[in-house]
Amino acid sequence: MTSCRLGLCALLAGLAGLAGCAGSGPARPPLDAGAAAYRAGEPVFVLDAVASVRDDAPGLDVYLGVPPASLVFRQTADSLTAVAGWIVTVEQEGGAPRSASPRDTFRVGTSDAARSAVPEWRVERFDVPPGEYVVRAVLEDLTSDRTAERRLDLRVPPPSGAPALGGLRLEAEAVDGAVDPVDASSVPAGLDSLRAIVQATGVPDGATTELSVVRVRADDEPAQRLDGLTPNQASLAARGVDLSDVDTVQAVRQTILNPSEALDVEAPLPALGPGVYRARVRLVAPDGTPLDESDRLFVVRRRDYPLVTRLGDLVGPLVYVATPGELDPLVEAEDPEALRRAFDRFWGEEMDDRRLAAATVRAYYERVEEANRLFATYKDGWKTDPGMLYVLLGAPRYVEATPTGERWSYAIGGGQPSVFVFERTAGRIYENAPFRVLTLERSRVYHDLFRRLQRQWRTGIVP
């Protein structure tokens, strides 16, 4: 996943004017609770599951989504091919585990399709009795032999005969017209076919469902400097989102007539801009008595995420390698041409070699794209603390999962600090938080290293 994306390549083509001077010419459940500690090179996939009743049998619908971009493709006779093997296990304490081991073969005709970030989906059904379950999924990229694991804790409720709602999930129409699941951690912005699906059982005739969609206040700022102040644990930066601070986006009601014992209730959602949202469906009796409710947090991202395909997307990540004031000309640019000239000047001031400049810019934004894939939570991956460190230094040599977070080790040398400690400030074992937040323990000890990294990137040395 280090080859240049077409969108990024097109932007880099405009860097031919870099001449090394300012006057150079003109020239893109908790949502992440299942993720373990970061491991370099592992594939990325989505695990989701909801309890449901199918053919009068309770059970779990397990959704597995893998973006082609996270797999390694090989050229075959007439296509690019990747093969993924799954091991999906549903286990109840004291009971025998149930498992499935499907295999998926992905064939695409172009390298662009192989770099797609849109998940390809598989659904596995497990008929299980009511109880508490652990769902585990292991994905193995059979080309690279790399594996990744996710887990979810879910409850299958006992049939009570009382009206009830199951887990809420998202669906939308694909390009080919089929209806596919939507990854709640990365919903494309402006999706006009998006809808919430929730199973309802025991619904009385004439009951209503009320769908509300709210936008949740969330931290969207880039990570602070390595040598800055560590955010206070009560701050939004350390907590990620504030579920008590919301703005209503939509509220709709529909009446259910002549319901079957178990039915899927569909509620259309509006086209949404980037941000964190909560969809909630309430089931209300004909006399107005609340019966049950089901909700889901989801994150809407720009359509080309995690790629960088537009000139405007290049500006934000420069905060990690810019000195105070250097970003002003880019932020204040009044039109695309002025922005392009400012972008060229930013990189060209320190590098006389145009090819070196283009290679450095390409390496920097490939780090940004990879950070987006690996560390996205309530905000873009490059904006998180782990994402910042990944952009500046690349993959750590070693990652240790600790009781309170993670410890990343690098081989930096030169007497510079090489260990970075992250504390989990949200999503800890004992709390019910919607996102896992890893906060870097900052220190003035990192001052010289941070300045050195900035200087290296600006002069064409990729750390």
Image (cartoon, grey):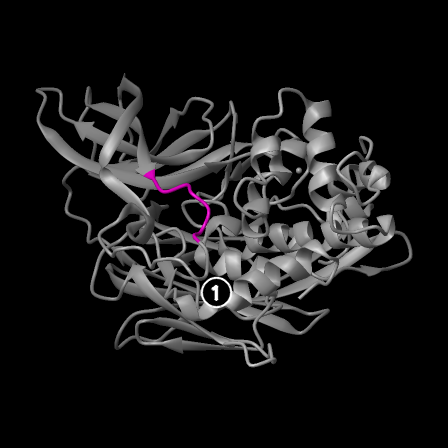
Considering only vertical position in the picture, is 233 above or below 12?
Answer: below
Secondary structure of the residue carrying tag 1 is helix
Q: Which region shows up in magenta?
A: 218-224
Residue 405 image point, x, y percent: 35, 70
Residue 248 or 228: which is nearer the viewer?
228
Considering only vertical position in the picture, is 98 above or below 359?
Answer: below
Residue 382 or 94: which is nearer the viewer?
382
Answer yes or no: is residue 232 visible. yes
> Mark 1 highlights which residue?
447
Residue 423 image point, x, y percent: 33, 67
Q: Is residue 232 left or right of residue 435?
A: left
Write down the quadrant of residue 179 in the picture. top right
**Membership of 113 in magenta stretch:** no
Q: Is residue 397 left or right of residue 89?
A: right
| Residue type (three-letter) at the residue carrying disc 1 | His
Residue 100 image point, x, y percent: 50, 66
Residue at 87 percent of width and 59 percent of height = 76
Residue at 81 percent of width and 34 percent of height = 27
Q: Main secondary structure of the magenta part?
A: loop
Residue 242 image point, x, y percent: 26, 41
